[in-house]
Each structure stands twice: as C-alpha cells, then as structure tokens.
Amino acid sequence: MALLNENYLKLKAGYLFPEIRRRTEAFVDSHPQAAIIKMGIGDVVRGIPRPVADAMKAACEELAHDESFHGYPPEQGYDFLVEAIVEHEFGSRGVTISPDEVFLSDGAKCDSANIQEIFSVDQVVALTDPVYPVYCDSNVMAGRTGEADDAGRYGGLVYLPCTAQNGFSPPLPEGHVDLIYLCSPNNPTGAVMSRQDLGRWVEYARSEGAVIIFDAAYEAYISDTGIPHSIYEIDGARDVAIEMRSYSKTAGFTGVRCAYTVVPKELMVGTQVGDEVALHGIWSRRQATKYNGVSYPVQRGAAACYTPEGSRAVRELVDFYMSNATLMKSELTAAGYTVHGGDNAPYLWIVCPPGQDSWGFFDVLLQQAHIVSTPGAGFGSAGEGYVRLSAFQQRDSVAEALKRIREL
Ligand SMILES: *Cc1c(COP(=O)(O)O)cnc(C)c1O
C-alpha cells in the first residue's frame, strides 16, 4: 500500500468554513423563510468592470482564428501585461521593478501556498495570529511543523499575536526566524502596516538573514496616503522580500483567476555549504516546471485594468466596496460596537459583545439577524473575541444587515 504524506494528518480538518456552512445550513433547514445575508466568506459580488470584460471577449475572439491564435503563454506572462504592472503598480509609486521580476499566476492563494517549497524544510516560520490560513497550512503540509495543540497552534511555528494592544501590527519575534508572512491590508483584521512598521520588519529581516513574504492582495483598498502599497517602498526591501498581488479583490477576478508574485533579483538565500543563490532563478525554475501560465484572454483582461477607462472602472468597484465598509463601520460604532479595520481594507474586525465568544456572537448574528459572519477564533487563538464582517456585498444587503444588527 502506498504511504501517505502524514503531515496532512496534522491539519485541523478544515474546520472553519465547513463549520460555518454546517451551522448556516442547519439554521436554514429549520428556518426556511429566513433571508440570509452572507458577510462571511471573502468573495466579491459585483460584475467584472465592463472594459475588462470587453477585453477578455475580444481576446477570446482572437483565439478563434489561426492568424491571431495564442497557445502556451510566455512562462512569466505576456510583455503587454508585465510591463503595464511594472509601470502602473510600482513605477507610479516610485518603485523600480524589472518586468522579468514579475511572475504571473492563477492566484495569490496558490503563490502564497507554493512559495515555501523553495525553502529548506528546517526553516523557522513566523506567522501572525490571527492569520490567513493558507500560510500556515501550506507549511504544515510541507512538514515544517509539529502537531497542533488544543489551542490550534502548531509546534515549531512562531506566532506573532496581533491584538488591540499593538494595533494589530505584528510584533517582531523574540528570537531568530527564517521566513515571515505579512499581510497588509490584513485579512482578517482589516489593519494596515505603516511605513514605520514595515521598516522595522525589513530591518529585522536584513539583520537576521530572513525572508519576508508580503501579501498585498488588498493594496488597492488603502486610502490613507501615508500607508505603503508595496513593501518595496521601504529601502532595502528588495534584498529580503517577495511580494504577492492579485486581481481577485480589485477587478472581481476571484472566479477568473489572475495574480502575480514579485521576486527581486537581489534576494539571496544560502545553501548548507555556505553558498548564496538568487531566489529569482529558483522560483523561475519552479514555475516553469509546475505551471503553464495564465490564459491569454485573462491576461488581456488584467491589462485592461490599466487603460484609462479600465482603471477608472476598477477604482469605482474598489470605492464601492470601501463605501460599504465606511457605512458599516460608522453604523456599527454608533450602535455601540467596537470596530477595528474597515478604513483601508474591506474587512471589519468587530469585538464581540460582553459575555459572547467568537462562535457565540456568530450564532447570535446567524439566528437573530440571519447574517453569516466569520468567527475570529477560526483565524487563530488571538482572534477569539472577534468576528469578521466583509464589505463585499450589494448595498441593499449591507443596509438590511445593519438594520437587523441595530435591532438586536
Ligand atoms: C483573497 C486573498 C488573496 C487572493 O487570492 P487569489 O488566489 O488571488 O484569489 C490573497 N491573500 C489574501 C490574504 C486574501 O484574502
């Protein structure tokens, strides 16, 4: 009999979203009339911007003709897209990225899960608590952890608690770590890291020889002008940081799939015998072996996000979700809740009312307001005492949800 990679058995059986579904289905079964409003899972709800959809349509038509057919795309992405990314996402902020440092992919989820493969299995990994579960589980699968304890914390991982006391900004670890996952704007807390916060981390990574994996999937949601959109806005970050971006939450691409990872050529890692190797070439090799690129119509759609009409439409979409977040934050605060996040991110991190824990408040919202939230404890033990509400909803649903919460 073939043997299993038993690291998979260490995973806590994907309990968060299945448990949310189970409780929601049980409630709907017993209350079939209830009009449920889903503010739990971080999926978008509005259509893809028209100029972007039109670009994809035109590209599909090109594929139907021998003269304009496209087969396998170039490994890292078509020039028309990577050059637009370099100019509009980075150049416009004074950050120089070379087009061949951009690796297109079908998602920041896959990239953030896959990136650990190119590091030694004995590396010490630091994660925030609460955390986007992908960073954690991908390292568990790879064998970089021990078993989980009763609080759900894996042996061998270094947890960085993000709490109201530290403004949900990850504290530096006490000792040495090799890999650090940071996410700003943050899912789930909605917090952002300031220039000073990021500067401290870049300095730590440089002095410890560590690598930062920076997830900027929500950078378009930043409205405060002082907040960095890219870790490369920090001096010295090119030597120590990989950055991930995605079209999922900006252009409604959660179903279409397109993202990219930046690996600067200066970023070096060591070997057992003390040599230095550039990660850029290793990631390139990994992608070329295991991945065949983003489809032509999808790359045309992504590129259309940078035309004048496209960028206006994407901006409108992001602004729409952020106006939900603003409305939610002000009304919930007025109703007496303590609400974090929601200013530079489409997530609100709400303190549970006294006497209720994460799942307790989840149940109250579900059973009394017919709203599906996400219990904070599902993202890590420091998330206990919070629920996450997402601003990815239609306006009338947001208004209705707020009315029901006010009436609780
Ligand atoms: C939604 C999200 C992503 C984007 O993932 P895709 O695979 O590109 O859809 C990445 N990171 C975080 C933290 C997210 O919430």
Image: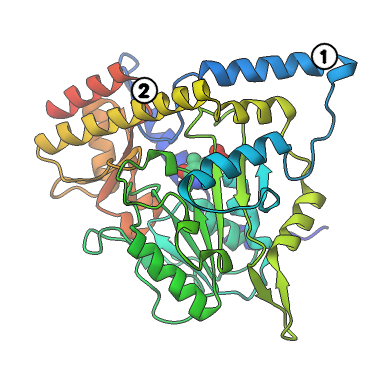
Q: Is residue 18 visible?
A: yes
Residue denoted by label 1: 64
- The type of residue carrying mark 1 is Ala
Percent coordinates x, y for residue 19 in the rendering: 43, 41
Question: Residue visible at 35% across and 16% down?
Answer: 32
Residue 266 picture location, percent across and down: 64, 67
63 displayed left or right of 184: right
The numbered mark at residue 28 is: 2
Q: Residue at x 40, y 30 (%)?
A: 318
Mark 1 sits near ligand 1, with its Cβ under 8 Å away: no
Q: Residue furthest bottom?
A: 273
Considering the image in quadrants, where does the N terminus appear?
Answer: bottom right
Q: Please, what is the three-letter code of the amino acid marked with disc 2?
A: Val
Q: CA distance from mark 1 to mark 2?
A: 45 Å
Relative to 302, residue 146 above or below: below
| Residue 106 visible in the shown view | no
Query: Which quadrant does the C terminus fall into?
Result: top left
Q: Is 42 positioned to the left or the right of 403 in the image?
A: right
Helix, strand or loop status at disc 1: loop
Residue occupying image coordinates x 29% and y 54%: 384
Q: Residue at x 52, y 47 (%)?
A: 90
